[in-house]
């Protein structure tokens, strides 16, 4: 069975011996003049969309459309895997409207909110970043930092939270406890 597209009409014809001699469409067009349907493909950005972050291999089972620029394809994939890692280490709901890398947090929202909750948060002791870390060897961040640096920061916060709980933030516990 072959499928043919004509405008918005799909013709399904059973062809014996290669052609259906004399077969025509409803408008009189011979079926030999109709091009076979091209299998649908999915754009790379749709396959590696952030909404697919839970899928370990989102490309499996997909017919991905050809890409003309390998560098942009690599960039799409790198962004997806960076976002996927960020979401895996950030189970707590964060801020809406403060940027993508603050929408989910690796520590409870109340703690981050008490610590400043912005990439440009700084205090007199020298702590900086949304979680106000000081003296733990975390990467320096601000609002101009790259996505990769921000995820490294959250990765550090996540590791610290896993190993020490909320004790690194205990000085501000009167605000969030």
Image (cartoon, rainbow, N blue to C red):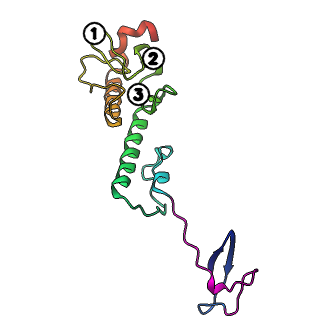
Magenta span includes 28 = yes
Question: Per the image, is 31 magenta?
Answer: yes
Q: Residues within 10 Å of mark 3 (few under 14, many from 20)?
A: many
**Discs 1/3, front:** 1
Percent across and percent down for residue 26 are 76, 80
Looking at the image, the residue that sits furthest to the top is 174
Q: Residue 160 at x, y = what percent?
A: 31, 24
Residue 175, x across and y down, in percent: 45, 8
- Crowd tier of the residue under label 2, counting other residues whose Cα lies within 10 Å: few below 14, some 14–19, many 20 or above: some
In whole angstroms, how far apart are the C-alphas of marks 1 and 2? 18 Å
* Nearest to viewer (mark 3 / mark 2): 2
Q: State the mark number for residue 90.
A: none
Residue 112 appears in view: yes
Mark 1 burial class by Cα count in 10 Å: few <14, some 14-19, many 20+? few
Quarter of the image for residue 112 reads top left
Report the magenta residues as a range.
Answer: 21-42
Q: Is 169 left or right of 42, judged from the image as shown?
A: left
* Mark 3: secondary structure: loop
Q: Residue at x 43, y 36 (%)?
A: 87
Q: Earlier in the sequence, mark 3 or mark 2?
A: 3
**What number of labels is visible?**
3
Q: Which residue is disc 1 drawn over? A: 125
Q: CA distance from mark 1 to mark 3?
A: 23 Å
Residue where numbered disc 2 is placed: 113
Label 1 residue SS? loop
- The answer to whether 57 is drawn above or below residue 37 in the figure is above
The residue beneath circle 3 is: 106
Above or below, 29 against 38 in this view is below
Q: What residue is at 70 percent from the left and 88 percent from the top?
A: 23
Magenta segment, principal secondary structure?
loop
């Amino acid at each position: 069975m072959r499928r043919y597209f004509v405008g918005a009409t799909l013709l399904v014809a059973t062809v014996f011996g290669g052609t259906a001699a004399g077969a025509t469409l409803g408008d009189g067009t011979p079926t030999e003049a109709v091009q076979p349907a091209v299998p649908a493909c999915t754009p790379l950005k749709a396959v590696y969309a952030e909404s697919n972050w839970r899928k370990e291999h989102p490309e499996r089972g997909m017919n991905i459309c050809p890409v003309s620029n390998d560098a942009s394809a690599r960039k799409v994939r790198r962004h997806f895997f960076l976002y996927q890692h960020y979401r895996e280490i950030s189970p707590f709901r964060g801020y809406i409207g403060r940027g993508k890398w603050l929408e989910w947090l690796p520590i409870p929202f109340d703690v981050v909110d008490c610590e400043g909750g912005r990439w440009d948060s700084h205090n007199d002791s020298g702590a900086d970043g949304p979680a106000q870390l000081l003296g733990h060897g975390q990467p320096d961040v601000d609002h101009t930092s790259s996505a990769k640096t921000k995820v490294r920061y959250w990765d550090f916060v996540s590791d610290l939270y896993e190993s020490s709980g909320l004790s690194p933030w205990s000085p501000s516990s009167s605000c969030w406890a």
